[in-house]
Image (cartoon, rainbow, N blue to C red):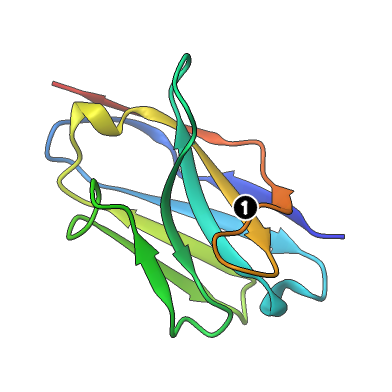
Amino acid sequence: QLQLVESGGGSVETGGSLRLSCAASGNTYTRYCVGWFRQVPGKEREGVASIGTDGGYTYYADSVQGRFTITRDNSRKTVYLQMNSLKPEDTAMYYCAAGTYCPPGRYWGQGTQVTVSS
């Protein structure tokens, strides 16, 4: 069993930055692909970024390519999403997920809200 806890969300202005963290508990964390997803009420959930077990594989949605960076620190059992040049359309609830394969979907966190004002 793996538990995920997101943090780092908040409110920023257009062009600002935030760093989200996804902290995991459980000894099998290093075996899992971890990813970030986001969802706006009334819209489908969107995969934002994911990272392989050793960080050698990364994926980014076109909408965030060049602005967001996903990294992981296995010693801290934490995955980070550095978000720069934020836009109002980045406003959403951001969720962390982990799974055996990328994109992951077996374990989910509770989410952290990101709001970008224009």
Extreme residue in the top direction: 42
103 up-or-down from 47: above or below: below
71 up-or-down from 1: above or below: below
Q: SS class of the residue under badge 1?
A: strand
Residue 47 on image: x %, y % = 44, 47
For the N terminus, the quadrant is bottom right
Residue 63 on image: x %, y % = 23, 46
Nearest the viewer among 28 and 99 is: 99
> Which residue is at a point 40% across and 72% down the rendered structure image?
58
Residue 97 on image: x %, y % = 62, 52
> Which residue is at a point 19% across and 55% down the rendered structure image?
67
> Which residue is at a point 73% across and 54% down the rendered structure image?
106
Q: Quadrant of residue 110?
A: top right
Amino acid type at circle 1 is Ala
98 up-or-down from 55: above or below: above
The answer to whether 19 appears left or right of 24 in the picture is left
Q: Quadrant of residue 53?
A: bottom right
Residue bearing mark 1: 97
Nearest the viewer among 55 and 103 is: 103
The answer to whether 56 appears left or right of 25 in the picture is left
Q: Quadrant of residue 9?
A: top left
The answer to whether 71 appears left or right of 31 in the picture is left
Extreme residue in the right direction: 1
Residue 115 on image: x %, y % = 33, 26
How many numbered circles does the render carry?
A: 1
Determine crowd level at label 1: few under 14, some 14-19, many 20+ residues with C-alpha closer than 10 A: many
For the C terminus, the quadrant is top left
Nearest the viewer among 105 and 97 is: 105
